[in-house]
Amino acid sequence: MDTILEIRHLKKYFDTKAGMLHAVDDISFRVARGQTLGVVGESGCGKSTLGRTIQHLLEPTEGEILFKGRDVTRLSKKECRDYMKEVQMIFQDPYSSLNPRMTVKQIILEPLLIDGEKRSAAEEKVRRMMETVGIDPRFENAYPNELDGGRRQRVGIARALILEPEFIICDEPVSALDVSIQAQILNLMMDLQEKLGLTYIFVTHDLSVVKHISNKIAVMYLGNLVEYAETEELFANPSHPYTQALLASVPTIDLKKAKQIQVIAGEISSPINPKPGCRFAPRCPHATERCFRVQPELHEINADHSVACHLLDKGQKGG
Ligand code: SF4
């Protein structure tokens, strides 16, 4: 595997009045060049904090972020600026992430001018980029509030791509859009990936969205990575009780299957000063006394699939 990004034992804690919030707690994974890793979980599971920590918008508490083999937590200021050019973000709500007082052209142009590009060359690049992401030139002087959601997200994508990054962290990029527009934006992102050789981390709460775009999926629950597998393998053989519950709660238009929709029951544990044991235990139908005492470790159940659950760690050491 040609690894472009490797995360090793990454932690991001926040000191709050109520105690230490473990937003990202000892996460490790790899992303192959040119592929997409989907990071899935409910809101508050730490997936957006993970994306922002990888992009260097947040300082990690502990751990390593190796991009092309270099630990980005140890870069100089200049190296850090270069890294942030190579690794860009696309945000959930283009409406709030785009400056309402700037036109489409100014929004896409700005990163190039800040980077020292001459205006005439930069404007030519903006024209080409608008074509690449499918924004009609007649919108170049429009303001974000004059665009529909799909076009606004195309502007967000154009701004993220204008400095020719290799790696994009997409934070819920389609969840604010209508379903028909979601499909257009996902198709655009897959086309751009192929054309420009991009690598994506795609953060979402919606497993059905990442099914089509991801090569691998990481499922997060309250700061922990609980399942990590090739996409086909995860959908064919979901093994962690939380992943099974997430899959069962994916809406379906099949009326026969609609009866099977479940809402995950039980109390969500607090990520502040978390208790020992499995964080899913209060909601897990299979929880035993050991689950409340010993935190399960992520381990391989086959070459393409790792799970952190005591149901699957027979023969492993533990309390
Ligand atoms: Fe459920 Fe125990 Fe597995 Fe946690 S470790 S998911 S509580 S069975």
Image (cartoon, rainbow, N blue to C red):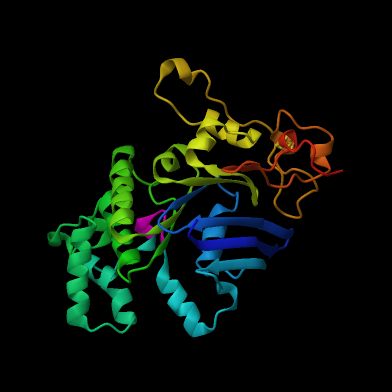
In the displayed structure, does residue 311 sit left or right of residue 52? right
Q: Nearer the viewer, residue 106 or 308?
A: 308
Q: Position of residue 301 (x, y in %)?
A: 65, 39
In the displayed structure, does residue 299 sit left or right of residue 96? right
Q: Nearer the viewer, residue 265 or 142?
A: 265
Q: Quadrant of the C terminus?
A: top right
Residue at x-position 64% and y-position 56%: 27
In the displayed structure, does residue 28 sit left or right of residue 122? right
Residue 9 appears in which quarter of the rendering?
bottom right
Residue 90 sits inside the magenta stretch: yes
Q: Quadrant of ligand 1?
A: top right
Q: Nearer the viewer, residue 27 or 46?
A: 27
Q: Position of residue 258 (x, y in %)?
A: 47, 20
Q: Is residue 153 visible?
A: no
Residue 269 appears in which quarter of the rendering?
top right
Q: Nearer the viewer, residue 66 or 295?
A: 66
Residue at x-position 60% and y-position 49%: 45
Q: Which residues are magenta?
A: 89-96
Q: Is residue 112 visible?
A: yes
Residue 46 sits inside the magenta stretch: no
Establish if 317 lies above or below 29. Answer: above
Q: Position of residue 270 (x, y in %)?
A: 71, 48
Q: Position of residue 240 (x, y in %)?
A: 64, 36
Q: Residue lying at the far right in this picture: please name it.
A: 319
Residue 282 appears in which quarter of the rendering?
top right
In the displayed structure, does residue 147 sit left or right of residue 239? left
